[in-house]
Image (cartoon, grey):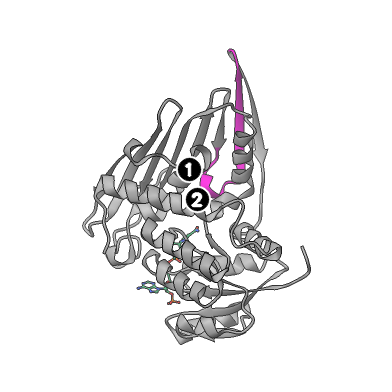
Amino acid sequence: MSDRIYNWGIVGLGRIARKFAEDLQRLPNARLHAVASTSHERAAAFAADFGATHAFGSYEGIVSCPDLDVVYIATPHVLHFENAMMCLENGLSVLCEKPFAMSAFQAHRMVETAHRNRVFLMEALWTRFIPAVDYAIALVDQGEIGPIHTVKSDFGFKMPFDPQSRLFNKALGGGALLDIGIYPALLALLVLGKPESEDIQATASFGPSDVDETTAFTFNYPGRAMALGHATLAATTPVEAWLHGTLGTIYLHPRWHHTQKIRVSLYEGRNMTEREVDLPYEGWGYHFEAAHVMQCLEEGWLESDKLPLEFSVELAETLDAVREKIGLSYE
Ligand SMILES: NC(=O)c1ccc[n+]([C@@H]2O[C@H](COP(=O)([O-])OP(=O)(O)OC[C@H]3O[C@@H](n4cnc5c(N)ncnc54)[C@H](OP(=O)(O)O)[C@@H]3O)[C@@H](O)[C@H]2O)c1
């Protein structure tokens, strides 16, 4: 890596934007250069906190910002498409929060726009870049636990019902599936690939704001494997994951989607050997995806090799299929 400094911008200055900005400070080649908010006061305060040079009181402001290398989109789900398209059409590289878009149709258009404008685009699926998760996936790819027959994971936390919050507000893309159910779906696709729509089963319970508060799904990979996922905003669950292969199991300790520890159990007849693997890190864990983006930009790549755009489109198609099964629709 050269000693070049990459100038980041952030659009939407909520909770995740702040954590991301804190993690950027861990990367010597990253600098928060510009921030954009719907409120000029919030933008100015955020910029002051992190030493950003430019503070915009509208999202559109960011496209005219000089010397910007990449924009991180951290708005509610329903705005990802519009905000990402604005940046891509203006020649800016984008790291866009999950879910990438509200539908596979939107995801396709974002990818097509990035290609046409020859700019970098990636979904901010930070889990893919967490060292312990990355290591678990590498072990699976190397055949350490044999062919995988089951992937199981959950993600649940109890959120008091608030119809205005983005987690419950349908107009903001609320619901468990798109916010946290995306993680079990992500793990299934990382390990087993995209399931066919007809091999997806899903069920959900809906709350008073007409979004799913709990969703459970199975993806069947006929004759090969199965994935089970569960997500809920109604109860706190362990947030664990298991990858079961014919030779052993990899367990991702809680909270698995940014875990610092995995356990590898190998079976030989009736004997079992176990090893714990610790891959600790400091910070929230968002610096790994940010570092990867800068590595890609350094190489001149227009997409990530670890998280290609086709993967994000397939994930969006899978979420569309789950939504169809549970009857979850948005405007
Ligand atoms: N990767 C992760 O671990 C992770 C974790 C949490 C969230 N996320 C993702 O990040 C995105 C933002 O989540 P968050 O938890 O940061 O949300 P948040 O705290 O509610 O912040 C969202 C920001 O978006 C802007 N915004 C624009 N229109 C809005 C509207 N109508 N209602 C509310 N906010 C609006 C606001 O920023 P301004 O006032 O500055 O315009 C707001 O502060 C979501 O898509 C979520 O899936 C990812």
Q: Identify the image quadrant of the N terminus.
A: bottom right
Q: Is residue 251 visible?
A: yes
- The crowd level at tag 2 (other Cα within 10 Å; few <14, some 14-19, many 20+) is some
Comparing 28 with 303, the one in front is 303
Compared to residue 134, the image places residue 166 above or below, namely: below
First reached walking from the N terminus: tag 1 or tag 2: 1
Q: Amino acid at mark 2?
A: Phe
**Disc number for residue 189:** 1
Position of residue 70 measured from the top left corner of the image (x, y, whole percent)? 59, 71
Circle 2 SS class: helix
- The crowd level at tag 1 (other Cα within 10 Å; few <14, some 14-19, many 20+) is many
* Pointers 1 and 2 in contact (C-beta within 8 Å): yes
Residue situated furthest front in the rendering: 116
155 lies left or right of 116: left
Q: Is residue 157 visible?
A: no
Q: Which residue is mark 2?
A: 311
Position of residue 254 measured from the top left corner of the image (x, y, whole percent)? 52, 43
Position of residue 278 measured from the top left corner of the image (x, y, whole percent)? 66, 41
